[in-house]
Amino acid sequence: MKNRFAKSRVIGSVAIAVVTAATSILFQSCEQHTITYPEAGYESFSTSVQPIFTKDCAGCHGGSLAPNLSEGSAYISLTTNDYINTDDPEASLLYTKLQGSHSSYTSSGNKEMILEWIKAGAPND
Ligand code: HEC
């Protein structure tokens, strides 16, 4: 009787360990693939702007449709093709597009974030 009880406790512990390991693996893989919007307040292109492009734009602008807004390509694509006007940030095609036909593709907070980046001189940081 005592022995049977001990055996089921061991099985129980192993089951808990397996479930715990599986859950943490699941959470880790979620963290790696979940793209979240940046916090309010412009910090840098890579932390404030690229996550918006990755989440809201790269589904269409992932390579074959200009500008290429996928990670690693967006900065070059935007700055070598006249999408950004640092002398008159509001007149940048990237920004006017988001005010016009693309206005539903991202939030107004994200549009402001993109404008802040252009106003900061569109650095590659
Ligand atoms: C559902 C697909 C789709 C999504 C999502 C999308 N776009 Fe577009 N975008 C297009 C298409 C199609 C065009 C070309 C036709 C046009 O100019 O509207 C375009 C054009 C553009 C242009 C002008 C390109 C040029 O050379 O004239 C810019 C800039 C742009 N998109 C930026 C963005 C940004 C930034 C986002 C994310 C907030 C975004 N797009 C999300 C489909 C999309």
Image: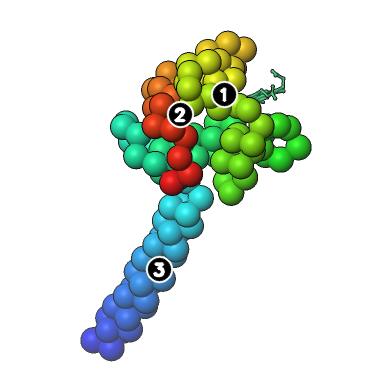
Kind of residue at disc 2: Ile
Q: Residues within 10 Å of mark 1 (few under 14, many from 20)?
A: many
**Residues at marks 2 and 1 touching, judged by CB atoms closer than 8 Å:** yes
Figure quarter occupied by ligand 1: top right
> Callout 1: helix, strand or loop?
helix
Q: Is the N terminus in the top left, top right, bottom left or bottom right quadrant?
A: bottom left
> Callout 3: helix, strand or loop?
helix
Q: Distance between the residues labelled 3 and 1?
A: 45 Å
Give the quadrant of residue 58.
Answer: top right
- Label placed on residue 46: none
Q: Is residue 28 above or below residue 57?
A: below
| Residue 11: image location, x then y, percent | 36, 78
Residue at (34%, 39%) from the top-left corner? 43
Kind of residue at disc 3: Ala
Label 3 or label 1, whichever comes before in sequence order: 3
Residue that badge 2 annotates? 118
Asked whether 57 or 6 is in front, the reply is 57
Asked whether 21 or 75 is in front, the reply is 75
Q: Distance between the residues labelled 3 and 2?
A: 44 Å
Q: Which of marks 3 and 1 is in front?
A: 1
- Label placed on residue 21: 3
> Callout 2: helix, strand or loop?
helix
